[in-house]
Image: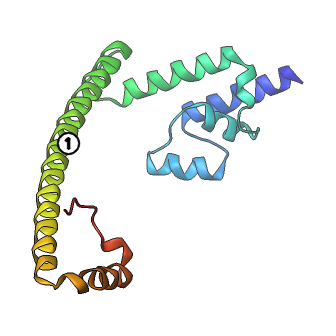
Amino acid sequence: MKQATRKKFLDALERLIKGEPDNRELRLKAKAGKLKINDSTVEQEAGLSVGSLRNHGDIKTMVKNKSLNNRVEQSKSTQCPIELLQEEVKKLKKDRTQANKKKTEYHKLAKSHKTALANQAASHIKMVQVLMEMVPVYEREKAMDKVVSTRADNVIDGKFR
């Protein structure tokens, strides 16, 4: 059984390399020029279940090598796998740098918003305090109960005398 499975994988890999898969979905991808050679497509082309390639380490290595070689052939700027991988590393480093810049920018923005919100909350608390002082003492508790019962999530904890 293992030899039959191995043969199916090897045949599927060859069809994918030629760009002539039997699988309908993969044929459509090949026509669109978006066919990739990886473990998943080899399993799909072979008609075997997902993960069935895990028991065939040598074929997985062949798939990885063929995939890398195909990417080198399709690349216009590189001539060997090492150049292609170095180019990818350079691109990933650039992406990481840009992501870190965005992260820093958003962190600063969040801090400024937090400060602005704290200032606004302090102003609100002070305004409520002044307004409560304008209400006669005997009606303050009733007024606060009315405010809280209107919308309970609209209350900010403050330090009132």
Relative height, residue 145 to residue 115 (above, below): below
Q: Residue 3 occupies which quadrant of the picture?
A: top right
Residue at image location 55% in from the left, 30% down from the top: 17
Q: Nearer the viewer, residue 116 or 35?
A: 116
| SS at badge 1 | helix
Q: Horizontal placement of 110 versus 88: left or right?
A: left
Q: Horizontal placement of 27 versus 44: left or right?
A: left
The chosen color scheme is rainbow
* Disc 1: CA contacts within 10 A as few (<14), some (14-19) or many (>=20): few
Residue at image location 33% in from the left, 21% down from the top: 84
Residue at image location 75% in from the left, 41% down from the top: 47
Q: Residue furthest front?
A: 138
Relative height, residue 134 to residue 159 (above, below): below
- Quadrant where the C terminus sits is bottom left
Image x and y of residue 10, in percent: 70, 25
Q: Count the marks.
A: 1
Relative height, residue 122 to residue 34 (above, below): below
Image x and y of residue 124, in percent: 14, 69
Q: Residue 130 occupies which quadrant of the picture?
A: bottom left
Residue bearing mark 1: 107
- Quadrant where the N terminus sits is top right
Image x and y of residue 92, in percent: 29, 28
Residue at image location 15% in from the left, 48% down from the top: 109
Image x and y of residue 70, in percent: 45, 27
- Residue type, mark 1 in image: His
